[in-house]
Amino acid sequence: MRPPPPPVVRAVQRLSAALERASAALKPAQARFLEVSGGVAAVALMRAAVKTRLIEPLATGRKTAQQVAAELGLHADTVHRVLRGLAVYGLVRLDAGGRFTLTRTGRLLIEDSPHSMAGWIRYVTSDAVLAGWLRLPETLADGKPAFNEATGTTLWEHMAAHPDEEAGFARTMHELTLLAAPLIVAAYPWPEHGTVCDVGGGIGSMLAEVLRARPTLDGVLVDQAGPLAASGEYLAARGVGERVQAVQGDLFEGFEARADLYLLKDVLHDWDDDQCRQILRNVRAAAVPGATVLVLEWLQEQNVAAFPVSVSDLMMLAQTEGRQRSAAEHQALGAAAGFEPARVIDTGVYGIVELVAV
């Protein structure tokens, strides 16, 4: 199915935001406050559901809490209360007879379901990640990376030491890339021939979709040994394996990969400005003059509050050393690393910021 055109995506987003603002305006301030502050309950409920596999019995059909509790060896009354809470957030439905039905959103909490987000819930509710969020009052005072100061380690060092969390994070990034890729692919005038290099591209989720859309393009995938080891099977399954060269490299140590077009998807938002300039300098060192870099990020303008970009920016504040940036900020980083700014394309979800090597 073809993705909707970017103007349609933007229109739907604006309509959704307008309806949300209208709904909030019609409620008493205290009621709206309680609604917003109750967000912690949604996260806690999803965490409990994932840890106990609470909703997996519902995958086979409608059940009462007593039936779910019997299957899982849990406390029936508490199961009913927690499932009822999940129904408030649209993850299950509750009927007048006390039976619960799984919704398509709730299905994402099942570990083995297609496009599962269970690993993401385990990651964002881990003690270390929550510690970063809880340090925000101190971060407001000193500006230091919340996660690093709270845990004594970086997020990347933490995930390397906790492979289950790292795997859940990687799978979620893959799923989010697959969600955005059709819009990105449709919005950009990809060349018919040449080579596209995905820098820090994991198993090649984004690269594969570009190559599928342009059967005469070749690809290079740059990442560390772990993702590259898993990429072969995935790229082959997507029908592009024979057209991709895997190159082991490091964002900060550099890599050797000649290409006409380089992709940096959701890479720069993890790092501070100095680190971003170093990453871009390494890309410039690999590129020939005239090569193009596409920075694929949610673009955050200074005085615009919007979901999901403004929330993602706060996640960067709480968990990494980075931030979401505007197109102009990406262009300034590129200029310091040997690139000239070119087009900025709004896909309706992601921004595409072109930088040309000089």
Image (cartoon, helix red, strand yellow):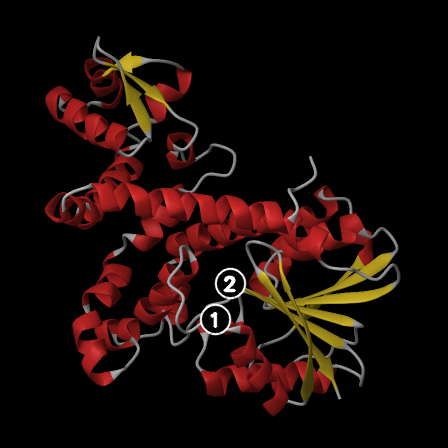
Q: Position of residue 312 (x, y in %)?
A: 40, 61
Locate residue 263 relative to residue 140 in the image: left or right.
right
**Dot 1: what SS?**
helix
Q: Position of residue 352 (x, y in %)?
A: 63, 65
The CA distance from mark 1 to mark 2 is: 9 Å
Crowd class of label 2 (few under 14; some 14 to 19; many from 20; radius 10 Å): many
Q: Amino acid at mark 2?
A: Trp
Q: Nearer the viewer, mark 1 or mark 2?
A: 2
Query: Which residue is tagged 1?
Result: 269
Residue 117, labelled with which disc? none
Residue drawn 68% across the image and 47% down it: 233
Find residue 324 and report its image quarter: bottom left
Residue 298, labelled with which disc? 2
Q: Residue furthest top?
A: 97
Task: Of the two numbered discs 1 and 2 on the same chain, state the one appearing first in sequence.
Answer: 1
Find residue 27 and report its image quarter: top left
Residue drawn 20% across the image and 31% down it: 85
> Pointers 1 and 2 in contact (CB under 8 A)?
yes
Q: Position of residue 341 (x, y in %)?
A: 67, 81
**Picture layout, residue 141 above or below residue 354:** below
